[in-house]
Image (tube, helix red, strand yellow):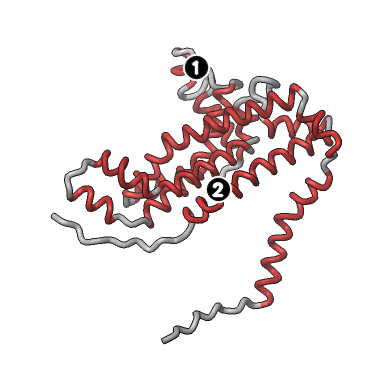
Amino acid sequence: MSVAPALTPSRPAVVVVLGLLGAAFLSLPVVALLVRVPWSDVGEVLGSSTSLQALWLSLATSAAAAGLSVVFGVPLAWLLAGGQGRLVALGRAVVLLPIVLPPVVGGLALLAALGRRGVAGPLLAEVGVVMPFSPAGVVAAQVFVAMPFLVVTVEAALRTGDVRGADAAASLGAGAWRTFRQVTLPAAAPAVVAGVALAWARALGEFGATITFAGNLEGRTQTLPLAIYLGAQTDPGGALVLSALLVVVSLAVLVVLRSRWVVAFRPVVPARGPRTG
């Protein structure tokens, strides 16, 4: 006996038109940027010492920021996913705050916390750590704005995932750390990979908090977005080349990891089995 295929609801014409207009609005600036790039100057711009230093610093600091986001963000996501109450809600709001704050405000907040005269700045100075206007400051600014993306992604996966594996491990006597390491974390691996990709891409493109907290020192704290900002005032063609480089790198990461972040953001109905006493 054959089963009739499910009917796909038709899309109203107005919804289709509005959706296409939204897609055009988002894609047109990127396409226009790529069209305006002076491709004949790409080799000269990318081969300059300033561009190479900015590119290397961006890759190194964004990779470090993504790594630190994993080290601290995954445990934080686990705590938020497993908790309830007002304290957890407040913690989630604090995690989301860097996403909605203007980046320059984030930079000023980092100065207030980690600057030489900040809350923790003198303590860091006593052990020889100076954050502002240093590569470490660049990483700190990137972690501040990027880690929330990883936390949100991983927490969503942990909250909507199947908890029966963790329940079974606990019923067999596995400790909390072993259950987290061998059951929970592997189950959330696609979300972790997606979160790392988003955090890295956000760190790579960070501008406002970096320039406010770490400055724009060539060869020391000048990342690719800062070099683009400076080039837009002195060498617009070079700035377009560097901007196209960032677009290509970011787009490549999203395309390569598409299967990961699509799975991570796919809604899952939690299936909770009976707990054993």
Q: Residue at x 69, y 43 (%)?
A: 248
As drawn, the residue found furthest toward the left would be: 277
Q: Residue at x 71, y 71 (%)?
A: 17
**104 horizontally vs 32: left or right:** left
Name the amino acid, label 2. Answer: Leu
As drawn, the residue found furthest toward the bottom would be: 1
Q: Residue at x 45, y 37 (%)?
A: 70
Name the amino acid, label 1. Answer: Val
Measured from the top left, where is residue 258 in percent x and y?
A: 56, 52
Image mark for residue 172: none
Q: Quadrant of residue 48?
A: top right
Q: Residue at x 65, y 20 (%)?
A: 220
Residue placed under numbered mark 1 in the picture? 129
Quick one: SS at disc 1?
loop
Is residue 264 depicted above or below 76 in this figure?
A: below
- In three-dimensional space, the C-alpha distance between marks 2 and 1, rounded to whole angstroms, equals 36 Å
> Callout 2: few (<14), some (14-19), or many (20+) C-alpha neighbours within 10 Å?
some
Image mark for residue 257: 2
Is residue 76 depicted above or below 132 in this figure?
A: below
**92 horizontally vs 238: left or right:** left
**Position of the N terminus by quadrant:** bottom left
Please state the total of marks drawn on the protein image.
Answer: 2
> Callout 1: few (<14), some (14-19), or many (20+) C-alpha neighbours within 10 Å?
some
Measured from the top left, where is residue 161 in percent x and y?
A: 36, 56
Quick one: SS at disc 2?
loop
Q: Earlier in the sequence, mark 2 or mark 1?
A: 1
Measured from the top left, where is residue 172 in percent x and y?
A: 17, 48
**Position of the C terminus by quadrant:** bottom left
Circle nearer the viewer, 2 or 1: 2
Is mark 2 in CB contact (under 8 Å) with mark 1? no
